[in-house]
Amino acid sequence: MKSLDAVDGNVAKIAALFPHCVAERKGKDGTTELAIDFDKLRAELSKEVLEEGEERYQFTWPDKRAASRLANTAIDKTLRPDLEASKDFWNTENLYIEGDNLDVLKVLRENYLGKIKMIYIDPPYNTGNDFVYNDDFAQGKDDFEASSGLFDEDGNQVLDPMQRNTESNGRFHTDWLNMIYPRLKVARDLLSDDGVIFISMDDNEAKNLKAVCDEIFGAQNFLAQVVWERAYSPINLMKHFSPSHDYILVYARNPELAECRGIPRSQEANDRYSNPDNDPRGPWKPSDLSVGPAVESNIYPITTPSGRIVEPPAARSWSLSRNAFRERLQDNRIWFGPNGDSVPSMKRFLSELRKTGITPMTIWKYTEVDHSQAATQKLAKLFDGKKYFDYPKPVELLKRCLALYTAPEDCIVLDFFSGSGTFAQAVMELNASDGGTRKYILVQAPEKMENPANVELTFETIPQFAEERIRRAGEKVKEEAGDKAKDLDVGFRVLKLDSSNMEDVFYTPEDFNEQHLFNYVDNVKSDRTPLDLLFQVLPELGIELSAKIEERDVNGKKVFFVDSTYLIATFDTEVNESTVTEIAKMKPDYFVMRDASAANDNVLDNFEQIFKHYSPDTIRKIL
């Protein structure tokens, strides 16, 4: 009932590679645990070990080690479904998750490890007004809550768990780096081997973000730093320059496996091809046959059909060797102009271009992917002209990111700084246009809504606004696409991060004495529902949170069926042997129930025997 502890996984990996570098020791609680002998490991990894204080290239800041450890620590939180806030809860495969994104990412790491095809995030730019998530490294949870002023004496939250990172803060860059580092570190674990991450940023932290990403994702996995033209007109009140661009950093988990699908060719680009010599291979376009700097062996004279002798320009050579040129000439791939007297060029056929589209360049103009002012206007139009958000990212910008590295076929994409919900709209619009079945996961902290245009606010938090935006955008997409989008998934399943469903005794029995146990009734908190328990079980069993769920009646008891009979679970009370027998006969892969669900002790006594008789391969779990 806890998220994965990444350190344990890393120790296991090192043990597999260097068994002699792992030793047993007594842990702080007195139990035996595996630990790394770093002296032996250092000897395995370097012929000359760097000594303490020795000069080296490194990128560091205060609390960096703590930020790194924070990414690895386990949590005992859970995701609770909210049916009322959801749309088409039982059928949709899209997820909208409310909660601190670091904790949510840790929960997702359970069953989305290496499964996310593409991530896009638009984190705080650290402009001096942005909120920075308050991850405290030096204090324990109890000490922090007592001293932070976030909670009153009854434990109720009284302040926003985020704070503005103003430029007067002596840890201005440090706090931002400590916020982004652990989140990107966990996000890397979620990326598939052929996955790609896009990160928007402006000049304030672009340099630091690049250094962080080089460290986490690997400098060798850097794909591009895209410049997006986000503004179409200058701000004349600016003293020196009016910024008109943002950056988008792009990294792959493995560039050899990541496939760039390119930008779809426009009709304007295709119209540049013609067929003046009626070549049976169709329209073509001439391209320069010379390259620079010159390659000595490729400098040779060429005789045109008219008899003129031409050579490559100064300091350049032909792009083809003599033999390669003769082969292209015989294949009618060399063009000498309509009169046979021009400098030779190569014929590039439209039919032979990459089917994946045009290779993207690193400057994206607003005429191609829209600008922030237009995005603001379009979002306001969706809300009857009311402007709730300043400068959201354009839908077209995110659609390009998605289209470059995701195929229409089923895949999972993620945005864990989702803001106004643009990413969800981009996924739905792209799916509608190419028949795709991409599934999204959006994560957003429950920040309070601001009021940039002094409109009458009807949404208290950003998630409330984003959820309504996704509802409206989804209906608009279906209406505009017509029959083509009749099967389009425009629903979303809302999940909210919360403390564990289990009472504290489930995790810390050593803190309970006989009197506690005498008064103890249940190991599940009284306000938690059967559906809450189901969603705490799903990550434990590696089942996606978007899995198909059905509620059925079995002998008068509410029973959940996940992905047909892959998992059958019941958390109802007074479950008798007849119900257990009927479920066992269905031969599920997994069966889960509560110990408090059993009608009597005989049910628990006979539980194992019933399954051994009817479905011995079913994995059984009792909460």
Image (cartoon, rainbow, N blue to C red):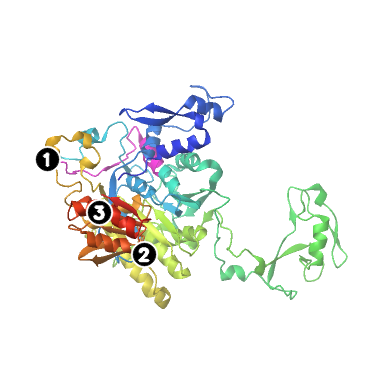
Distance CA(mark 2)–CA(mark 3): 62 Å
Distance CA(mark 1)–CA(mark 2): 61 Å
Q: Which residue is mark 3?
A: 606
Q: Is residue 8 above or below residue 408?
A: above
Q: Between disc 2 and disc 3, whose residue precedes?
A: 2
> The N terminus lies in which quarter of the figure?
top left
Specify the segment rendered in magenta. 154-183
Q: Which residue is mark 1?
A: 518
* Element under disc 2: helix
In the picture, the disc for residue 378 is 2
Q: Is residue 542 visible?
A: yes
Q: Residues within 10 Å of mark 1 (few under 14, many from 20)?
A: few
In the rendered picture of this protein, how many numbered marks are placed on residues?
Answer: 3
Residue 590 part of the magenta segment: no
Q: Amino acid at mark 2?
A: Lys
Query: What residue is at 64 percent from the left and 65 percent from the top?
Result: 353
